[in-house]
Structures are given as structure tokens and as C-alpha cells.
Image (spheres, rainbow, N blue to C red):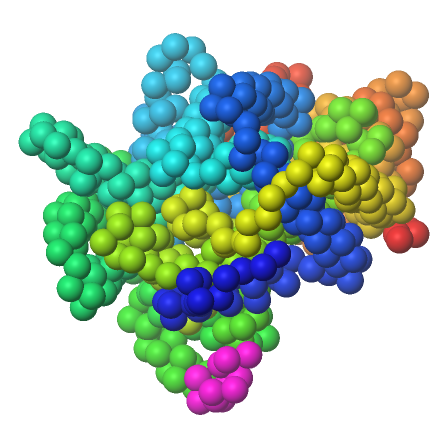
Amino acid sequence: MSITSKSHRPYSLLAVLLALCLIISSTGSFSSQTSLAIVSTTVLLLIASYYLRPFFNRLSIRQIRTITYLALTLMVVGQVLILIFLPVSVYHDPYRVLSQADQLAAGDHVWQSTYFWRYPNNVPITYILSKFFALGQLVHLSDNITIHLLTISLLDTFIVLALKTCADLKSPQSTFLGLLAFLTATPFAYTYYLQVFYSDLPSMLAVLVIFRLLWRWPKANTTRAKVKISLDLTATALLGMLMKPNMIVLLPAGFLTLLILAIKKERTKKQLLRPILFLSLGMTLAMPATLLIDRASSYQPHSAEAFPASHWVLMGLNKSGDGMYDDQDVEKDISLANTTARRQYDSQQIVHRIQTLGPLGLSELWLKKLTILLDVSAIQDWYNGGFESAPKWYQDHIAFYQKAIKIGYVVASIILFFTVSLRLLCWRPRFHRQKDQLALLAVLTALGYLAFHVIFWEAESRYGQNILPALFVLLVALPAPVTRRQKVTEVKRQKRWPRVAFLISATIAIYAVFLQSYSLSTIVVAAQRSQLSVQYHAQPTTISPGTTLEQQVNLAKPANTFSVQIQAKSTMTVTLQNLQSGQVWALTEKADEFILNQPLPAGSYQIVIQNQGLVPQLIDLVQTNNYTLAPFPVTINQVQNKNASLIYLFEWLNTKPS
């Protein structure tokens, strides 16, 4: 490919900086076991897409529409089947939000978990989710169905709006089909965002909607249309801020865009001024809205438990933890008396860590955090503890499926990053054009998100996904690099197809060989790991003397390790019974768990926990009001508790991983 350097010389330093960030961070998803497969698959697909691009660009609008409808239909069918047959055990922050929302929907406004005192930013999303649960209960839906309807609606709305943005900006057919493939044919549509409800997807949707509203603003020719967009901008910014406060980066990005346009003496900057002011209004309203939500939900802040903002800055400077969430930093802040003491300690440690790291150490840490932010290799594991009980057909080939998911999304993301980077490097802005103004805002937004977490905050791989709406905007707003046009004869066109067929075949072959030769060291066979956690003062359940708890679990495949969480220092008798053979195994106590290391064939099992002593004992039993945690309920002295479950895990530990 020959790029005409004169007309496409890099112009914007900001664009070059973002391109470098994307290129560098692409390496974060590599590992010693997957690098070869990822690199070879990515290169072959990029070459194949280069040869196929002219063919895609000749497709008619009708053909593109047919492909789109077919892809979206298959996607929805696949999503529904996954939600039915492959439910996951949601845990950590999303479950705490879900559990409290379930409690609020049932009319119980007591905030027992200290989690929300420590992380009050999740109170608004919890309250909003509770209203969806209450609405679902009006039509007799369980919270499981309600939350599935909510996630699939949010996700598919995001996908459709991203595609509509591509069409509205009149991108080439090849760009549209590439975006369609990323959104519907990769794990993006079928894993974390579909199976776990949390603040990430609503926030991403809000950012995408804001970009669309800013694009529509100059095209609104009537006062009524302007008022509608203004109200939509304000409401979207408000909801987005309630979902995830780091969306605040849009505000400086918007005003920096106006400043750059003013420096360039672009009169069209006035087209962005008013909508950005409405954007600011919506974000400003988030603070009083949060106070109203606190009052409506009876939430009371507790300074004895609250963490100051400096806590996350401190973790972001922890070199031993790569600037990620760090248990030691958390435990230290918990040990301090109140927010003021924590802020003083954090401030001292922040200065100390900066001085210890020095310029070179800081740069090294920031580079590491950048690669972490855009590491997408674990998307299928984000905030879930494994499948509740995956069917046999899935577990028969679980290593293949999980590695295909991992490599598939990594490859798709790298191709997206590479494509956007190439367009950024070849972009020469002309700011009188609305597309370039929107692209500038997208560049500043993406850089803002990355800079916030790299320099100021702690880093997690999920956080980097917040820049996807901005990357999609850049993909569809920036032109593809211009190549020297060559006359394509029929002979050349016929030669192209064998090359494409070879490249695709080689990609499939490399992919298949790698996946078939790879096995997992640990496979979750069945799990229920949703819990409020002892660290947030989850209240144990008291079991009276002579009480027996039982819960059935079906294993579609053999397991060789089983554990059930009880309470440290509780004296209980825990056994596991095979319901087919009648064989019974006694579990061994280890800290707050009872464990069994024993080959367990596929079949139905009964967990039996008995208090055979003379005094009450404590046990970790998870209970909800309208949310089903596991396929089978807990029975206490033969009485079923539909929405209660033990915390258990069945695994297969591979003693000879590849």
C-alpha cells in the first residue's frame, strides 16, 4: 500500500499521541502462550481485509442492509441462547449493586453492607436498578429476567446506535462492515456486557449518545429540534455521570475542543458552544441528583468507612501492584479511624511514592498501566465466578471455546486499534468540517480517559473499554488512508480471490492448531460465588442445633475439587453425596471453607451441612428477595428457600496443563 505522504502528513500532535497509546497498549493482551496465534491471525486478517476492501465497497446499500439485518438477527438469537443456557455466577461489585437493588425493590431501605459507605458512587446505579426490578415485579418477572432484559436492551441499543452513527457519517461500506463484524461477531456482544450488569455499558452508551447529539446539533434547523437536543444532552450527561463519574473527562475535552477551534479562528466553533454548555449543565446536575437519590433510598454516608479520592490515587502509584487495585493499600486505609485520617495518610504516601519512583519509575509505571487499561484478554472473566452449571456440550470443548473467545476479542481489538491509529497518523484536520470537529472531540475524550487512569487513578483492564465510543467515532469520521489508484482489470480481480482464500484458510488453520493443542489449568464445572463478602461486613446466618441445610448441584462434567464457604471457627459437619450412587464424602475444614479433593464423576450431588452440636453456629448463606442465585434452592430442615444459596465451587484442576 502506498500512502501519499504530502497530503496525509500527520498534523495533530494529539492524534499522534493517541495513536501511539493505542499501538503501545495493544501489547497488553499478549502472553507467552497466545502471542504467536494473536500476531499471525491479526496480520493475516489485516492483509485479507486489504484485498477484500474494494469488493466490500462495491456492495449496494440493499446488500449492506441485508447483511446487517441478518447479522443482528443471528446476534440476538445467540445472546438469548447464552442467557438461557450459560448463566454466570455474578460476583464482586456488580453483585453487591444487584443485591442491594433487589433489597430496595422489596421495600427494605436498610444499607447493611459497608460497601456503599466505602464506594458511594455506586448508590445511584443501585437505586436506578431497583426501580427496574420494581417495574419487572409489577408484571411478575423475576429479577433474573428483568436484569437480562435490561442488559440485552442496553447492549443492543449501543450496537445499533454505533452502526447508525457509521451510516449517518456516510462511511465506506468496508468501514461499516468492519464495525458490524466487531460488534456482532466477537465476544463484545456475548460475554461481559451481556451477562453482567454494571456501570460500564450504561456509561459507554451515554458517551456514544452524546457524540451523536453533538453531530446532530448543527443539522437541527428549528427551535423545537434544538430544544429537544438540548434536553437530551442534559439528561444523557446527567444519567451518564450518575452511572460513572469518570465521564467528567468529556467536560474538559469539550472545552479544549472549543479552545483549539478558537485558536484556529474557526467560526463554526459556535456550533459546539451551546451543546457543550448543556453537557456541562447535565454533569453539574449530577451532584444534586445524587443527594436526592441518597434521600429517596435512605442512604446515609459514614465517614468512618468512606474512602477519600486520594485512596485511588495512592493505589495508582503502587508499583508492586502495577497501579491496580491493591489489597494492602485497602487494608491500611480500613485500619484508619475516618476519612480525614485516611486523606492525611494517603497524601503523605503519595508524595513518598512519587519521590521514590522518580521520573523514570513513574514513566515505567504509567507505561505498564497503559497496557493494562486496554488488555481485553480476560473479558469473559470480568466480574463473574464461572458458569452456574454449563451444559455438557459446552464443557466438552471448554478449552477451545474459552481460548477462541480470548484470542478472538484480542485480535478484533488490535485490528480496531491499528485501523484507528493509521487513520489518526494520516489525518490532516480541516476544522471547518463538522466531521473533523467531532473527531477532535473524540481524540481528546479518549486521551482524557487514558490520562485519568494512567496518571491519576488506579488502572483495571475494564476501564480502557470506556474509550470504545470515541474510537468508533474516529473510525467512522476519519477517512481511510489514500492509496494510489490502480486500474483493476478482470484478471487482477480474479487473482485476488485465491490470495484471500489462502489468507483466510491460513488464519483458520493457525487458529485451529493453537486451540486444539491448548488446555486449561483450571475449569469451573459449577459455581455459586455471589456474596456480599466478609470485608464489607456481610451478616452470617445463624444455624440452630439440629438444623440441616441441603442444596443440589448437577455436574455436567467430572470435577476433582469442591469447596463450600462456611464461617471461620464454625463447628459444622459438611458432606457431599452422589445422588445416583449414594456415595458420601466428608469435607475437610480449612479456614472459612470446607474442601474436598476427590474425583467426582458427572451427575447429581447433594451438599449437606449439619449443626450436630449443642450451640448455634454461623454459616455464609446468600439470600435475596426476587433473584435466583443457583439452579437449585437451599432447603433448611426440608423447607425450600427459593432465593437462597450456599457459596460453592466445583472445579477440574488439570495436573498436566499445556
Residue found 91% across the figure and 38% down from its top:
599
Residue 190 picture location, percent across and down: 59, 32
Residue found 50% across the figure and 53% down from its top:
482
Boundaries of the magenta span: 354-364
Figure check: 12 above or below 38: below
| Residue 388 or residue 607, whichever sits in front | 388
Say if residue 132 shows up in the picture. yes
Say if residue 374 shows up in the picture. no
Residue found 44% across the figure and 67% down from its top:
6
| Residue 551 or residue 602, whichever sits in front | 602
Residue 159 picture location, percent across and down: 46, 32
Per the picture, the main secondary structure of the magenta-coloured stretch is helix
- Work out which residue is located at the far left of the displayed protein and give it: 223
Residue 388 picture location, percent across and down: 67, 30
Residue 74 picture location, percent across and down: 60, 21
- Quadrant of the rendered structure where residue 337 is? bottom left
Report the quarter where the N terminus lies: bottom right
In this rendering, would 210 be left or right of 274?
A: right
In this rendering, would 236 be left or right of 547?
A: left
- Quadrant of the rendered structure where residue 335 is? bottom left
